Image (cartoon, rainbow, N blue to C red):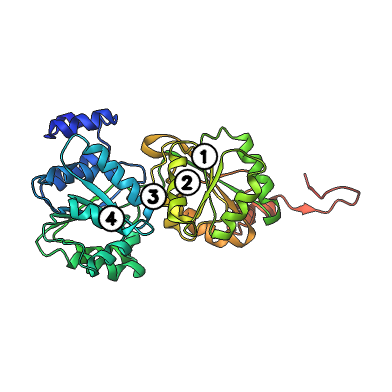
Amino acid sequence: MKFSELNIPSDILGALEKMGYEEMTPVQEAAYPIIAEGHDLCALAETGSGKTAACAIPLIQKVDPELNAIQGLVIVPTRELCIQYVTEIQHIARRTSVVPFAVYGGFDKDIDIAKLKHGVHILVATPGRLLDYLYSGVLSFKHVKCAILDEADELLKVGFLEDIEFILSCIIREHQTLLFSATMPEDIKKLAHDCLRDPRHISLITERKAPTSIDHYFTYQHPKDKQAALIKYLKEEDVKQALIFCNARHMVDKMFASLRKDFEDVGYIHAGLSQDKRTSVFRQFKNMKIRYLFASDVAGRGLDFSHVSHVVNWDLPQGRESYTHRTGRTGRMGKKGKALTFVTRHDLSDLRELIGRNEISPLWIGKDPLLANNTSPERKARNRKRPFRPNRGKGKPVAKP
């Protein structure tokens, strides 16, 4: 379906056309009528499927520009996602009188407060900064009509849950609540229902957890050989942009320092950097001034880097949701992408679970250690048919014919 077939005001439709948005993605087509009709929604869809625009378009339509008050609230887990989300809303609302604004940690509070007092219709925020302003009385949610939790599975985890519950309790009028995520574990799904009222459900990932637009490669390496293998891979591949994930900040720093000697246009980002530095790196990567970006999981959720052709997991991600979000930075909006994960001997048990639960068809560069360590009855039977006997002469053992 095309956006032009919907009852969208001409000012919003014109902005969408300028952005190149003509055909609706499946999640946009499924979510738009539900949101427009005012129902609560729990939507699960692959990363890069257009979830942001799916709720931003009807949200802008719900705003009364004549009312100088916050009417839409969007909560996201990271600063970078906050910037990306408000930028998308700004582009869609550019021909309207709707004013979006973002607040997040690390930015000047005086500027925030001045802007909020001047007038904001849609507020995008991270939980920490939002709580600061609620406790200090800077914000009022008296006129909020719609609240959106993006990356809802992360927001409803133990560390965030109490904050989110308090924030939503500050919305005193009956309102619409929308949850969007690429993953939703069962325990988080139960918590989500506490935030929703008679919700509608959309799930476009039930049948296949791993997007088909991504080829999932793995390589089994000794830790000492990983760096040489990574350099070889990046030099041999046709890399437009690459995101290289590490599990720890110190490893991000170390890999950046090492590989900047072998490659140009290398950058790094993690939560230990100042907000100004993080924002600068984020924008440089979006604008393709950085080609190879080493990152912690701060860059692993929701961020739309449309030119990323390759994602590399230097470390095996800690959990299948993390793998889904990391690899989802490529292969977005139907484009093809490649994900390469480095595996060591210590990762094998976690790897089996990851591949099984994410329903991945792994492509191995080099030997497949899972196959080599397969001790199933079928494999044992095959081994018995071709027994290996030591060669009495020089050289390697050979199979008996």
Question: The N terminus lies in which quarter of the figure?
Answer: top left
Q: Is residue 28 left or right of residue 282?
A: left
Q: Of the residues shown, which amino acid type is indicated by label 4?
A: Asp
- Asked whether 221 or 384 is in front, the reply is 221
Q: Residue 139: where, in percent of width, then height? A: 19, 62
Instruction: Determine which residue is flagged by label 1.
Output: 290
Residue visible at 28% across and 71% down?
Answer: 162
Upstream in the sequence, badge 2 or badge 1?
2
Instruction: Determine which residue is flagged by label 4.
Output: 112
Instruction: Determine which residue is flagged by label 3.
Output: 209
Q: Of the residues shown, which amino acid type is indicated by label 1?
A: Ile
Q: Check the image and report above or below for 25 versus 172.
A: above
Which of discs 4 and 3 lies nearer the camera? The answer is 4
Whether residue 128 is visible: yes
Disc 2/disc 4 C-alpha distance (Å): 22 Å
Disc 1/disc 3 C-alpha distance (Å): 30 Å
Which of discs 2 and 3 lies nearer the camera? The answer is 2
Disc 2/disc 1 C-alpha distance (Å): 8 Å
